[in-house]
Image (cartoon, helix red, strand yellow):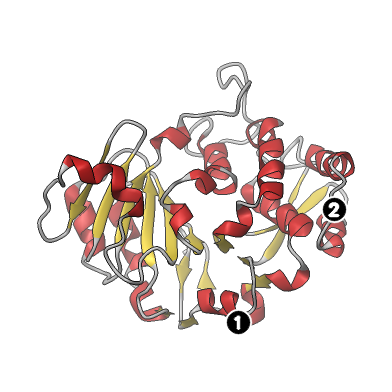
Amino acid sequence: MIIFVFTSSDKQFFWNEHTLCKPKPERISQISTWNPTANARKTAIAFLYSDQVQKLVPKISVLDIQFLDNLSADIVIFHTDYPAKAHMQAIASVTKRQVIFYNVDDAFTSFPKGFDPYLEEPNWMKRGKWNYQHMCRFWFKLIMDIPLVLEYKYVMRLDDDSKIIGAWDNIFDLMGKRNAVYFGNVEEADSENGLPGLMKLKTFTINYTESYQVIPKNPKRLIRAFDIPNHIRLYNTNFDVIKVDFFRRSEIRHWTDAVDATHGIFKYRWGDHVLRYLTTALFATPVEVLLRTDFNLPYCHPC
């Protein structure tokens, strides 16, 4: 069964692909815990999209064949605005998986406490003044507060310009067998020259570990994060997988909230990819992090 779920702070409803009718009002408050199948709420493949969702059809159409998980992972499409019914049906027609549409308008209209988006100017723009920064904040922090997400054990992220190619084994199972908390993509780096203010993140990270007596779980990775002058290393997060309960641990939430309070994501475009690298360096042991390149999983980006 494919369920289309729409939710925001003031409006929630869902569609059943067969009946295409609104549910009874009492079901609305139970959307985030509704479990129509035995496999539901274990794993999810998530997209964040602000355009016409039928454009995701080429990316989603390959998942049933090329991602070998017996169709157990839901597809969750976080979106702004509300997709047309025909566009939702276009997605439904190319997959046998449960598909959930989840409105995140509130995430793209909220800012950290004390940040004035009218007085500040971004040092990097894409698709609007603050849209890219909102995206970074969503994947780094806000996704961990979405009730639906809390029902999953693992969430895989795929960007709209990313695509699984070839056959992939069930990496959710692989993570479980190895007790991994993060499955990362290729390693790259951002630079101060391209993003003025980036290196303030290095200063903040060092001060944070000293102030809160944080002993990095992977000190070699933390050193490597800053080993190129005026650069910070990152995991390219157009694909990755998180173990949800790990990233909701109190010590990680404290770090996440502290980063958010600096306004660095908005002022200096501290990306979720750089922040993910630092988060795993601080709080995940070397064996708890797996990388796509170590398993020869074929992948296309951009595509």
Distance, label 1 to label 2, CA atoms, is: 27 Å
Q: Where residue 139 appears, x then y in whole percent?
A: 55, 48
Question: Would you call the spot at circle 2 few (<14 residues within 10 Å), some (14-19), or many (20 or more)?
Answer: some
On screen, residue 231 above or below 287: above
Q: Which mark is residue 63?
A: none
- Judging by the rendered image, the residue that carries numbered circle 1 is 296
Q: Is label 1 in a helix, a strand or a loop?
A: loop
Q: Nearer the viewer, residue 31 or 300?
A: 31
Residue 102 rendering spot, x and y as whole percentages: 35, 47
| Residue 81 in view in this figure | yes
Image coordinates for residue 138, horizontal then vertical, percent: 53, 43
Question: Relative to residue 195, is residue 43 drawn left or right?
Answer: left
Residue beneath disc 2: 226
Type of amino acid at the residue the image marks with label 1: Asn
Q: Is residue 254 left or right of residue 168?
A: right
Front residue (pair 56, 46): 46
